Image (cartoon, grey):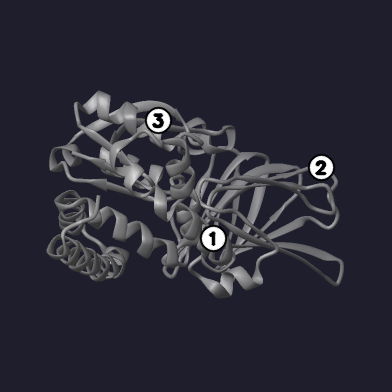
Amino acid sequence: MTDHPSTSSSVTQARARAREQALDWLVRLQCADPQDERDFADWLAQAEENAEAYLQAEALWNGAALQQAAGHLQRRRRRAWPARLRRYRAPLAAAALLLVGLFTFGNLPVRLQADHLTAVGERQRLQLDEGARVLLNTDSALASERHDGQRTARLLQGEAYFQVPAGTQPALEVRAGPLRARADDTDFAVRYFDGQAQVRVQRGDVDLQSPDDQRVRLRAGDSISLGPAGFSAPQRPDMAKALAWVEGRLVFENCPVSQVLDEVRRYYPGWIVNRNPRLEQLTVTGNYRLDQPVETLRALAQITSAQLHEYPALVILN
């Protein structure tokens, strides 16, 4: 059975429009506000070709996300609209293999400097020469170097947990943007995003230094941040929650859903869109596996009575 010429023409035009709009959305969503996310979800729901076009556009934008989409398509053959995308699986998967190396990290200079990288949703365990162990969290980059006998680990992006054994000589030096830390016989985490470094000490002491030579000693249970304005006041967070990611968990206690979604997004290689403004006013408590972000979203939807719509590399909360 063949399509009527006028029908085929209209379908072709609709797909062409969808492709143009998908490219616009990719750019717009880089700095999206809540209204942008709601408008995007509305656009996706308007026509099936919109979702198809968006997957193709994202394939060229982000190879890692495309691999996730291709995996979903292969596993969910019986779902209605993913079945329509099946014909794109082979060319999109091929594009992913070519592009994943270039676009896993949007920050190419970071990628070029790093010795170790993790993709979104991935964690990696490392062993440094002097015996220190490192757990590199999702979407992170680490460089390790030795100069004049001093081993330095540079966290270029993301989050890492360091376990430094007693007697490490010289003491391990960790740098993250403006932060310099020296540690021996201690366990601590460093987080670095957008020029702001944060340190949380689980065991032992860590000596910190800022570019203008401010010095702070953090002890077990302490947390502090360092940014353009210098060191913040030390705090005493609940380390069981703050460092739950080390054990592969995400723990929230009376936390706004918006903050929970922001944290889950760090571990999900795709888009999470919230179209339900009511969720912004709710708080939740829970303990979730960080390697199962979609299961976390399903649990949140059940707790908040929200509707969850799952697509390849895309989850929408209504």
Q: Is residue 314 above or below residue 215?
A: above
On the image, the x and y values in percent for residue 248 come to 55, 34
Residue 288 appears left or right of 134 = left
- Alpha carbon of mark 3 to alpha carbon of mark 1: how far? 28 Å
SS assignment at label 2:
loop
Between 120 and 147, the one nearer to me in the picture: 120
The amino acid marked with disc number 1 is Ala
- Alpha carbon of mark 2 to alpha carbon of mark 3: how far? 39 Å
The amino acid marked with disc number 2 is Ala
Q: Is residue 137 above or below residue 309?
A: below
Could you say which disc has been placed on residue 94 in the image?
1
**In terms of sequence position, does the residue under pointer 2 or pointer 1 come before the other?**
1
Seen at 33% across and 29% down, the residue is 298
Could you say which disc has been placed on residue 295 in the image?
3
Check disc 2: other Cα within 10 Å, few if <14, some if 14-19, many if 20+. Answer: some
Residue 31 appears left or right of 286 = left
**In terms of sequence position, does the residue under pointer 3 or pointer 1 come before the other?**
1
